[in-house]
Image (cartoon, rainbow, N blue to C red):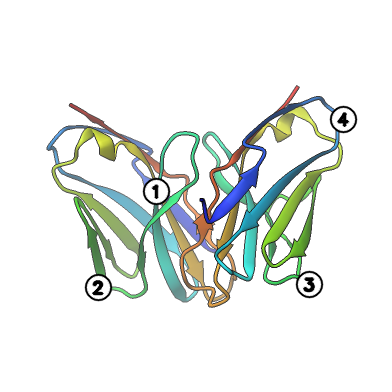
Amino acid sequence: DADVTQTPRNRITKTGKRIMLECSQTKGHDRMYWYRQDPGLGLRLIYYSFDVKDINKGEISDGYSVSRQAQAKFSLSLESAIPNQTALYFCATQSSLGNTEAFFGQGTRLTVV
Amino acid sequence: EDQVTQSPEALRLQEGESSSLNCSYTVSGLRGLFWYRQDPGKGPEFLFTLYSAGEEKEKERLKATLTKKESFLHITAPKPEDSATYLCAVLGSGYSTLTFGKGTMLLVSP
């Protein structure tokens, strides 16, 4: 089983719909991240959380919200999806040491039509 | 603000033709430089961490090196299965999250 699991893996939704992407991890890490990846733009940070009570905005948080339900679970919501939120979304985890590698999930491909 | 620039954007090699990928960075106090491999439609897979200038790490046909301004990922005698996008990321003392470059797309032809 994967250490970082994202659900769903693929999703097509309509403009204006609310959608939630979920991430769970079994690595026991405190730090969790949500990124989006677009061709030519690389990985961009949406939100991050250093522990259950900590939530921080990243580079591109507008139009997104997150919830850290437990140490192992971090969800990303699009309150009202728009077509330019079509992208590949990744969840990542990292130990609380902070200077070690981050581990990524397999990604969620989201299409907003 | 931490910055990472990777070059070239894309690289095409023949099987067995060695080459290097570059990652130039600007950071206030490097806490770590990370290399990842990403296959199409999949999550980045960790390769190496380098912490200080002069450090080198090796894994099979890959070798990563670090100076005070850049890192190189050397690929020796590549095989078609080495085809992927290679991502570089840095962690600086002023920021608590990784800053990624846009990656180098490597294609190795048989």
- Residue B15 falls in image quadrant: top left
Amino acid type, residue under disc 4 in the picture: Gly
Residue that label 2 marks? B54
Q: Secondary structure at mark 1?
A: strand
The answer to whether any part of residue B7 appears in the image is yes
Amino acid type, residue under disc 1 in the picture: Gln
Residue for point 68% across, 31% down: A86
Mark 1–mark 2 Cα distance, whole angstroms, equals 19 Å
Residue that label 1 marks? B6
Question: Which mark is on residue A53?
Answer: 3
* Pointer 1 and pointer 3 on the same chain: no
* Pointer 3 and pointer 4 on the same chain: yes
* Pointer 4 and pointer 1 on the same chain: no
Residue for point 55% across, 47% down: A43
Instruction: Output the chain of dot 1.
Output: B
Mark 2–mark 4 Cα distance, whole angstroms, equals 52 Å
Question: Which mark is on residue A16?
Answer: 4
Mark 3–mark 4 Cα distance, whole angstroms, equals 29 Å
- Look at discs 4 and 1 and give the one toward the viewer: 4
> Are circles 3 and 4 on residues that touch, CB within 8 Å?
no
Q: Position of residue A73 (x, y in %)?
A: 70, 59
Residue for point 54% across, 62% down: B98
Mark 2–mark 3 Cα distance, whole angstroms, equals 39 Å
Is disc 3 surrounded by few (<14), some (14 to 19) or many (20+) residues within 10 Å?
few
Amino acid type, residue under disc 2 in the picture: Gly
